[in-house]
Image (tube, helix red, strand yellow):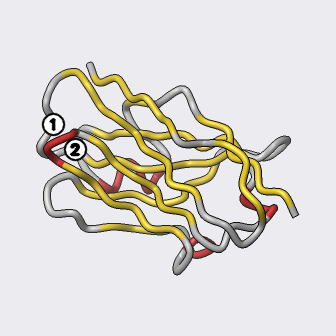
């Protein structure tokens, strides 16, 4: 079992930046992938991006390319989401997720584990 705990959410102004962290604990998972999803009020949860724990390869949703960056720290079992040039439309609950078998499960929206979510609010 893997536990995921997000942190770093809060309020930012449009044009500003936030960095979210997701610390993973439980059994080790060298073959896993991790990712970030977000869910705005009244909307479905959508993929933001994902990263392979094995080689660090990344995948981003088209709408986030160029503004958001996912990275990992293997030693800390932590994945990060750096969000720059924030827009009010980025306001959502952001969820960390992990998959046992790699990026494809994250991209399909079927990870094995979810965090509890952290609220990000961008004011105009």
Up-down: is 25 above or below 17? above
Q: Residue at x 25, y 57 (%)?
A: 52
State the image quarter where residue 61 is shown: bottom right
**Quarter of the image that includes the N terminus:** top left
The residue pinned by badge 1 equals 29
Label 1 – label 2 distance at C-alpha? 5 Å
Quarter of image, res 70: bottom left
Residue lying at 76% horizontally and 48% vertically, measured from the top left: 121
Left or right of residue 10, residue 29 in this image: left
**Which mark is drawn over residue 32?**
2
- Residue 16 or 4: which is nearer the viewer? 16
Is the residue under label 2 in contact with that under label 1 (CB below 8 Å)? yes
Q: Nearer the viewer, residue 122 or 33?
A: 122
Residue 82's disc number: none
Residue 68 screen position, x and y as percent: 52, 68
Quarter holding residue 29:
top left
Lateral position of residue 90 relative to residue 8, left or right: right
Report whether 94 appears left or right of 19: right
């Amino acid at each position: 079992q893997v536990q995921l705990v997000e942190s770093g959410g809060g309020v930012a102004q449009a044009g500003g930046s936030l960095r979210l962290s997701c610390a993973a604990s439980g059994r080790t998972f060298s073959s896993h992938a991790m990712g970030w999803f977000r869910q705005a009020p009244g909307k479905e949860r959508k993929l933001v991006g994902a990263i392979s724990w094995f080689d660090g390869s990344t995948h981003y949703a088209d709408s986030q390319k160029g503004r958001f960056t996912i990275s990992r720290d293997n030693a800390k079992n932590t994945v990060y989401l750096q969000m720059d040039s924030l827009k009010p439309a980025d306001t959502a609950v952001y969820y960390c997720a992990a998959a046992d078998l790699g990026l494809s499960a994250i991209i399909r929206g079927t990870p094995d584990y979810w965090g509890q979510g952290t609220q990000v609010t961008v004011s105009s």
